[in-house]
Image: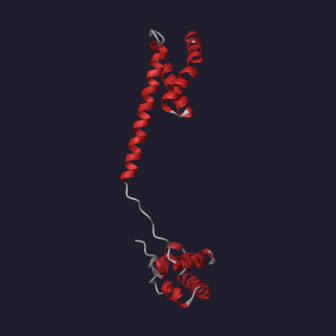
Amino acid sequence: MAENGRDFGRFYGEHFAGLCKQLYAYHGDRAEAQDLVQEAFVRAWMRWATVSRYQDPAAWVRQVAWRLAVSRWRRTRTALAFAHRQREQHAPPPDPEHVTLVAALATLPENQRRAVVLHHLADLSVAEIAEQEGAAVGTVKSWLHRGRAALAGQLDDTSAATVLDGRYDDGRA
């Protein structure tokens, strides 16, 4: 096995650079050419007992590298064709009221923010929030009261009414 390893090492040293130049000329990307030749050499190493007996083992490695290049090119072409067939989907810009609301909610303490979001945007009852948060119903009512008061001070009357009445919709499904 050690003799085979030395033979392969010598073979690799003699042919790697030349094969890289050939694949670079074919492929046009030096780093990709080096990767392809390296992969071909790995495959040759795995079959070295057989490949070493070929009349021209370098031709076998070159052929494997070229086939790998074609395979990668085909995969890339298929992926690009798929991408071009996809419709462009643009998300609508956020509603200015949504941006204002998110900014105002970010100023609330975490428990108040969760309570307001769960109650007014997710339509959970106070009891459901209390169960989910592991808190007493009175505590959730307190969080909601404080959260609404803080939001009312930051949002104009229309925005506050929209959010607090549960009519807020950012236009996205």
Quarter in which the C terminus is drawn: bottom left
**Above/below status of 3 relative to 105:** above
Q: Which color scheme did the rendering employ for the protein? A: secondary structure
Give the quarter of the figure containing the N terminus. Answer: top right
Percent x, y for residue 150? 62, 85
Which percent across, then down, holds residue 34? 55, 29
167 vs 140, nearest the viewer: 167
Frontmost residue, 136 versus 133: 133
Left or right of 144 in this view: 91: left
Residue at position x 50%, y 27% in the image: 23
Q: x, y (%) of residue 104?
A: 60, 79
The image position of residue 112, as x and y in percent, is: 58, 79
In this rendered view, identify the residue nearer to me: 159 or 23: 23
Extreme residue in the bottom direction: 157
Q: Quadrant of residue 144?
A: bottom right
Q: How many numbered discs, if any?
A: 0
Viewer can see residue 135 = no
Instruction: Please name whichever residue, 93 or 99, is drawn nearer the observer in this view of the structure.
Output: 93
Q: Place residue 90 in its image quadrant.
A: bottom left
In the rendered structure, the answer to whether residue 40 lies left or right of residue 107 reads left
| Image position of 151 with respect to 32: above or below | below
| Residue 30 in sight from this viewpoint | yes
What residue is shown at x 60% (from left), y 88% (from top)? 149
